[in-house]
């Protein structure tokens, strides 16, 4: 099936109630804000600090691969540039369509949580972030600014960035433990 046909079919989902919700949600990640905020919040709690660093590293890695490497190389036109008859519910984004940076950031955050060894982040949070990541990818197609393959590529790049960040956190943790001798600690006062 033609990718524009899929996007055109999704345009039948539009409604006066849904459009502002989707537009508001998708705009929470115009520069990765939602996922950066998630990482910062996780950093604030000792129990989830490692997960917070992993999320932030994953989002940065995903942005480097997507926005600084792939997009400038491929310069794929956005669907809204190919079919200008569709009224956009958000301002037309700058830059190339492939891959979706919004989807990359969302899946980078989710994957960083899923791939963390001995995660301290609550499972409900991880599932919630994953659901939000899926919705982010759908929102980009609903808004007619990304093709399905842009979103699929964002999922792949984001997931790999999350995996890389989780493995980096594991390596740093292992390195820290081998350099720091175990010191027996007495009861806390």
Image: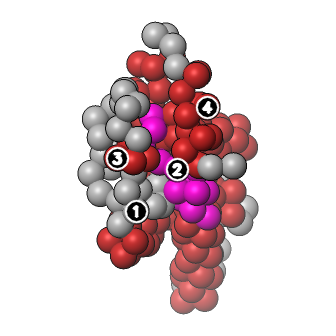
In the rendered structure, which disc, 2 or 3, sits on the residue that comes first in sequence? 3
Q: Which one is nearer the viewer's eye here, 107 or 174?
A: 107
The x and y percentages for residue 8 are: 55, 34
User: According to the image, label 2 marks what residue?
Assistant: 147
User: According to the image, label 3 marks what residue?
Assistant: 81
User: According to the image, label 4 marks what residue?
Assistant: 9
Under tag 4, what secondary structure? helix
User: According to the image, label 1 marks what residue?
Assistant: 76
Q: Residue at x 37, y 57 (%)?
A: 77
Q: How far apart are marks 2 and 3 (CA)?
A: 12 Å
In the rendered structure, which disc, 3 or 4, sits on the residue that comes first in sequence? 4
Q: Distance between the residues labelled 4 and 1?
A: 21 Å
Neighbour class for label 2 at 10 Å: few (<14), some, many (≥20)? many
Asked if the residues shown at circle 1 and circle 2 are in contact, with their CB atoms under 8 angstroms apart, the answer is: yes
Q: Of the residues tagged 4 and 2, which is closer to the observer? A: 4
Determine if the magenta segment contains residue 146. Answer: yes
Q: Which of the labelled discs sits on residue 145, or is there none? A: none
Under tag 2, what secondary structure? loop
| Residue interval drawn in magenta | 143-156
Neighbour class for label 3 at 10 Å: few (<14), some, many (≥20)? few
């Amino acid at each position: 099936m033609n990718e524009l046909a899929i996007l055109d079919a999704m345009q039948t989902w539009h409604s006066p109630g849904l459009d502002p919700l989707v537009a508001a949600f998708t705009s929470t990640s115009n520069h990765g804000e939602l996922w950066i905020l998630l990482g910062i919040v996780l950093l604030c709690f000792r129990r989830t600090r490692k997960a917070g660093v992993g999320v932030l590293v994953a989002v940065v890695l995903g942005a480097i691969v997507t926005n600084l490497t792939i997009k400038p190389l491929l310069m794929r036109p956005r669907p809204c540039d190919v079919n200008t008859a569709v009224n956009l519910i958000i301002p037309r984004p700058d830059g190339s369509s492939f891959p979706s940076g919004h989807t990359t950031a969302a899946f980078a955050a989710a994957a960083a949580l899923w791939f963390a060894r001995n995660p301290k982040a609550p499972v409900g949070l991880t599932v919630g972030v994953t659901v939000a990541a899926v919705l982010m990818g759908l929102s980009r197609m609903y808004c007619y600014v990304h093709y399905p393959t842009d979103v699929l590529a964002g999922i792949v790049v984001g997931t790999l960035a999350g995996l890389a960040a989780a493995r980096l956190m594991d390596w740093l943790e292992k390195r820290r433990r081998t350099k720091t001798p175990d010191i027996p600690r007495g009861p806390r006062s």
